[in-house]
Image (cartoon, rainbow, N blue to C red):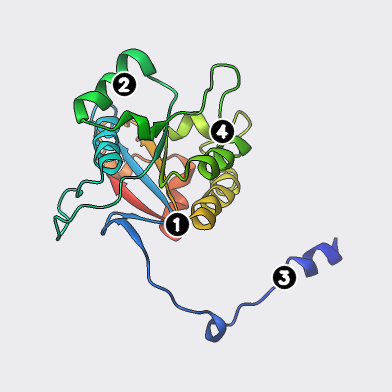
């Protein structure tokens, strides 16, 4: 046990750390190489918002509120949704948003459900070169053995998941539902365990 602790022990001197700038997919909201959470109450339009964002990205169009209206290179997007039908909900919404559906990819979950630790995610990112990956909602992709109300369990899943974003230079977006606690503001209702983790490792966008 003592030997294991020694192998896992390393002090980092900040003098040896090379500073670098953050690259942004959408400044100042969604950075490359990190996790981003879009969260809010059910019915507030989180999925609609992210699908419209995906549509703009697939067409290479400027994103809302950008200082420059210059076009960008169209990119591929991986979008996973555990709640809505691809045929009668997701595809119509993408078409309504004007997306280039040829650039929107979905990992087939008809046989095996996907999770954040699934190797199919990395494989799909490699094969498609996707610059944005969306898991909607986060609760469905944590894995069967993860208690979403335990910060230590959430951290063990989100840390390696976030490393994927950094390694492949993409954006990983998690859609989250805030708990509805009677008589309290939405900003104080997020008792899910990832609330204690997001400030240290990824940008959080609240829709």
Left or right of 7 in this view: 31: left
Mark 3 or mark 4: name the one nearer the start of the chain.
Answer: 3
What SS does tag 1 mark? loop
| Image coords of residue 127 (percent x, y) | 53, 41
Contact? badges 4 and 1 (CB < 8 Å):
no
C-alpha gap between disc 1 and disc 3: 25 Å
C-alpha gap between disc 2 and disc 3: 49 Å
Label placed on residue 86: none
Q: For residue 177, which quarter of the picture?
A: top left
Residue at the extreme bottom? 15
Mark 1 or mark 2: name the one nearer the start of the chain.
Answer: 1
What SS does tag 4 mark? loop
Q: Badge 2 is on which residue?
A: 91
Label placed on residue 115: 4
C-alpha gap between disc 1 and disc 2: 27 Å
Q: Give 30 or 202, whichever is nearer the viewer.
A: 30
C-alpha gap between disc 4 and disc 1: 19 Å
C-alpha gap between disc 2 and disc 4: 22 Å
Q: Please state which of the two labelled residues, at mark 4 or mark 1, is closer to the viewer.
A: 1
C-alpha gap between disc 3 and disc 4: 30 Å
Left or right of 36 in this view: 18: right
Mark 1 or mark 3: name the one nearer the start of the chain.
Answer: 3
Q: Badge 3 is on which residue?
A: 9
Residue at image location 25% in from the left, 30% down from the top: 48
Q: Please state which of the two labelled residues, at mark 2 or mark 4, is closer to the viewer.
A: 2
């Amino acid at each position: 046990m003592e030997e294991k602790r020694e192998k896992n022990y390393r002090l980092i001197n900040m003098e040896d750390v090379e500073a670098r700038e953050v690259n942004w997919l959408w400044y100042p909201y969604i950075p490359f190489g990190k996790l981003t959470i879009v969260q809010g109450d059910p019915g507030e339009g989180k999925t609609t918002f992210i699908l419209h964002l995906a549509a703009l990205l697939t067409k290479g169009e400027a994103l809302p509120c950008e200082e420059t209206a210059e076009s960008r290179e169209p990119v591929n997007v991986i979008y996973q949704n555990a709640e809505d039908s691809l045929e009668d909900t997701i595809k119509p919404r993408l078409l309504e948003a004007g997306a280039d559906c040829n650039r929107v990819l979905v990992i087939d979950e008809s046989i095996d459900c996907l999770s954040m630790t699934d190797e199919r995610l990395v494989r799909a990112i490699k094969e498609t070169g996707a610059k944005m990956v969306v898991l909607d909602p986060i609760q469905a992709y944590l894995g069967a053995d993860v208690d979403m109300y335990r910060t230590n369990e959430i951290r063990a899943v989100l840390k390696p998941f976030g490393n994927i974003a950094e390694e492949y230079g993409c954006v990983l977006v998690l859609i989250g539902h805030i708990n509805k606690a009677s008589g309290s503001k939405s900003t104080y209702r997020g008792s899910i365990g990832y609330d204690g983790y997001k400030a240290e490792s990824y940008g959080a966008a609240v829709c």
